[in-house]
């Protein structure tokens, strides 16, 4: 160990002396004899270096065997694949399409609301004018409700003389059986319906009026009031029919036959030549029962609209 330390301490001097000796030797004329001699000297110097520096100090000369350089780990950054970009673009396109549809729907709704408001203003103006005209023409106040009906106090033509029914008619009426089901209210209504269906309108009027008077809270009351109005309308008395139709709609607008009564009220007004009130009734039906206007009562609603000019 001491020798090795001494050798390492003298290393620069020995190397310098060896290199100087080699340079002196190579500088002599004998250096030109052969390249083999130069190569031998180089090997000797290399051997001397390895003896002095058995570990191979990189500070003075490069080692004969270089360690393999390890490749630096490449830092990979996540890249967005083409398919991911395609998905994002597709979703953006879908969102833009939905926004466009919502914008268009909003504009349509706004236009529809504006048109509806204008229509309501026109109807209210016409309704106010109709109520004022009715008040001026009659001392009796107009009935409380949204749809004005003809004033029953106006002069009516004298009713035709009622002749005694013929034996044949009496027998035909008696042939219609009154049902007995245990529900007396429904039995009364059903009997009135059978009379009306058979064309016995005066008898149907009496029977249905009895049902309406005695069973005002029955589940068939909306049917009874509406059918009572139809019994008068089919008998050629639209003025009395209009009163019953209006009463049925005003009493319970959500009743089963309240929408029907509103349309029959318009038909009664058309029969009386009162186009203004007919248009009000039709407009009220369209606003209150839009589903029925394109459903069960579509044909009747369209037919009545075609018979009057409500512009």
Image (cartoon, grey):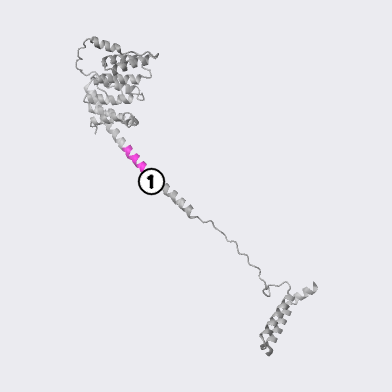
- Quadrant of image for the N terminus: bottom right
Residue 69 lies, in percent from the top left, at: 63, 67
Q: Residues within 10 Å of mark 1 (few under 14, many from 20)?
A: few
Q: Which residues are magenta?
A: 103-114
Front residue (pair 98, 115) = 98
* Farthest bottom residue in view: 29
Does 52 appear in magenta? no
Q: Look at 70% across and 80% down and name the residue there.
A: 43
Q: Is residue 169 left or right of residue 73?
A: left
Front residue (pair 204, 154) = 204
Confirm whether residue 151 shows in the render: no
Query: How many numbered marks appear?
Result: 1
Quarter residue 182 falls in: top left
Confirm whether residue 197 shows in the render: yes
Q: Is residue 146 left or right of residue 15?
A: left
Q: Secondary structure at mark 1?
A: helix
Q: Look at 37% across and 44% down and name the residue there.
A: 103
Query: Which residue has dot 1 on it?
Result: 100
Residue 57 lies, in percent from the top left, at: 70, 72
Quarter residue 298 falls in: top left
Q: What type of secondary structure mainly makes up the magenta span?
A: helix
């Amino acid at each position: 160990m001491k020798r090795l330390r001494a050798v390492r301490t003298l290393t620069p001097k020995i190397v310098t002396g060896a290199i100087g000796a080699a340079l002196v030797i190579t500088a002599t004329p004998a250096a030109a004899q052969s390249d083999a001699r130069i190569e031998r000297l180089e090997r000797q110097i290399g051997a001397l270096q390895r003896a002095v520096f058995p570990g191979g100090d990189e500070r003075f000369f490069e080692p004969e065997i270089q360690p393999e350089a390890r490749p630096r780990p490449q830092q990979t950054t996540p890249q967005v694949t083409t398919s991911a970009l395609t998905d994002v673009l597709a979703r953006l396109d879908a969102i833009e399409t939905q926004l466009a549809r919502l914008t268009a729907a909003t504009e349509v709704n706004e236009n529809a609301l504006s048109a509806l408001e204008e229509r309501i203003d026109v109807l209210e103006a016409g309704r106010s004018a109709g109520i004022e005209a009715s008040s001026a023409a009659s001392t009796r106040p107009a009935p409380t409700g949204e749809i004005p009906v003809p004033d029953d106090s106006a002069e009516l033509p004298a009713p035709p003389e009622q002749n005694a029914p013929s034996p044949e008619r009496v027998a035909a009426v008696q042939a219609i059986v009154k049902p007995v089901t245990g529900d007396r209210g429904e039995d009364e209504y059903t009997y009135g319906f059978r009379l009306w269906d058979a064309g016995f309108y005066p008898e149907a009027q009496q029977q249905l009026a009895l049902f309406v008077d005695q069973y005002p809270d029955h589940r068939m009351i909306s049917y009874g009031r509406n059918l009572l109005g139809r019994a008068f309308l089919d008998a050629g008395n639209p003025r009395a029919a209009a009163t019953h139709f209006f009463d049925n709609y005003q009493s319970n607008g959500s009743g089963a036959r309240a929408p029907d009564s509103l349309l029959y009220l318009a038909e009664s007004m058309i029969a009386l030549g009162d186009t203004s009130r007919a248009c009000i009734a039709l407009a009220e039906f369209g606003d209150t029962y839009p589903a029925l206007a394109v459903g069960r009562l579509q044909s009747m609603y369209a037919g009545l609209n075609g018979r009057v000019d409500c512009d």
